[in-house]
């Protein structure tokens, strides 16, 4: 079994690690676009063109499913990706986990990129799934880039700036960009208030990984006779190794540790 994941950068590591935990025998194809990132400032048409190129590079490796591990690409490009690849390759998009976060009753904060914060898409999800819940939208300028390059000082500074915009009574934070899941515990430490119940973080990696495996009929079990799992890394279509910044995160180290291709 082979699962492909795509993103502009290393935000796909969280979902890839979730797939690896659920199915340690799965081969993974990680297709990103360092030559074209960031995708957020691009027009929807330009972004879709880049996303299609990244998806088609992954499709050449004949995966059983493709995870679009990027909120921005899922918003703007999912219909085009599905039109290009389905039904041969199921395409699974990523949606911010607003529904499960709101189910706890709030107050809830949604950390997202400036382009997503306040967007009709995010406002629609809030209206659909968080009606009556106190929701604060928190823009996080620079955080995704800081995570992408494992810039420790910039990560600390951008998390601190977003935490300052997060009301102290918030009990749940939605991580509305896949990059943020790589620094989830640092976000928790910055937002958690003393003397109150533990903050709940809601990412999408686990849910999207499970959905991809359901679509392939491979959620349960492991092929005990399979060879050691492989990892193929595509950087703007070029087959290379994981970028060094990926190894700054536990998810990247997990993939590297069990993948003989590295």
Image (cartoon, grey):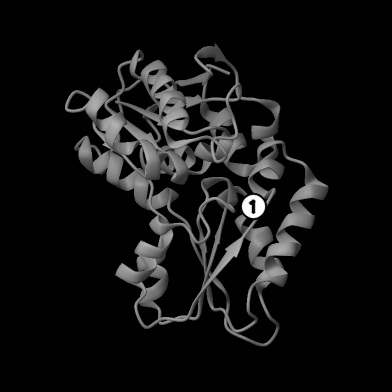
State the residue position of label 1: 183
From the image, which quarter does the C terminus lie in? top right
Residue at the left extreme, as displayed: 87
| Rendered image quadrant of residue 163 | bottom right
Residue at x-position 37% and y-position 74% = 130
Choose top left, top right, bottom left or bottom right for residue 164. Answer: bottom right
In front here: 29 or 96?
Answer: 96
Q: Is residue 243 left or right of residue 204?
A: right
User: Dot 1 lies on which element?
Assistant: helix
Q: In this view, does 29 lie to the left or right of 147?
A: left
Residue positioned 22% across, 35% down in the render: 216
Q: Is residue 84 above or below residue 144?
A: above
| Crowd tier of the residue under label 1, counting other residues whose Cα lies within 10 Å: few below 14, some 14–19, many 20 or above | some
The image position of residue 222, as x and y in percent, is 30, 35
**Residue 229 in sight from this viewpoint:** no
Relative height, residue 260 to residue 71 (above, below): above
The vertical placement of 243 against 198, above or below, is above
Quadrant of the image containing the N terminus? top left
Q: Is residue 89 left or right of residue 120?
A: left
Coordinates of residue 175 in the picture (x, y in percent): 52, 58
Q: Can residue 31 be seen in this view?
A: yes
Q: Is residue 83 left or right of residue 185?
A: left
- At 53% across and 38% down in the image, what residue appears? 13
Measured from the top left, where is residue 120 in percent x and y?
41, 58
Q: Who's the residue at 36% across and 52% down the image?
A: 207
In this rendering, is residue 160 above or below 56?
Answer: below
Q: Where is residue 177 in the image (x, y as percent from the top left)?
A: 52, 50
């Amino acid at each position: 079994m082979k699962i492909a994941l795509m993103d502009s950068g290393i935000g796909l590591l969280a979902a890839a690690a979730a797939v690896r935990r659920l199915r340690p025998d799965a081969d993974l194809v990680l297709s990103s676009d360092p030559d074209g990132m960031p995708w957020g400032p691009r027009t929807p048409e330009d972004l879709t063109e880049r996303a299609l190129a990244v998806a088609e590079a992954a499709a050449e490796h004949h995966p059983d499913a493709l995870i679009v591990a990027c909120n921005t690409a899922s918003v703007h490009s999912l219909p085009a990706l599905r039109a290009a690849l389905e039904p041969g390759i199921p395409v699974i998009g990523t949606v911010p986990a607003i529904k499960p976060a709101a189910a706890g009753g709030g107050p809830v904060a949604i950390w997202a990129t400036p382009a997503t914060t306040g967007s009709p898409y995010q406002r629609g999800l809030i209206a659909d799934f968080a009606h009556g819940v106190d929701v604060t939208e928190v823009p996080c300028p620079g955080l995704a880039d800081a995570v992408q390059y494992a810039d420790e000082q910039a990560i600390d500074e951008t998390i601190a700036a977003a935490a300052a915009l997060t009301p102290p009574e918030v009990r749940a934070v939605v991580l509305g960009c896949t990059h943020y899941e790589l620094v989830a515990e640092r976000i928790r430490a910055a937002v958690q208030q003393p003397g109150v119940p533990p903050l709940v973080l809601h990412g999408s990696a686990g849910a999207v990984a499970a959905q991809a495996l359901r679509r392939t009929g491979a959620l349960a079990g492991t092929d005990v006779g399979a060879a050691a799992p492989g990892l193929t890394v595509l950087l703007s279509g070029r087959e290379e190794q994981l970028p060094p910044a990926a190894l700054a995160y536990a998810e990247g180290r997990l993939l590297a540790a069990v993948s003989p291709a590295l």
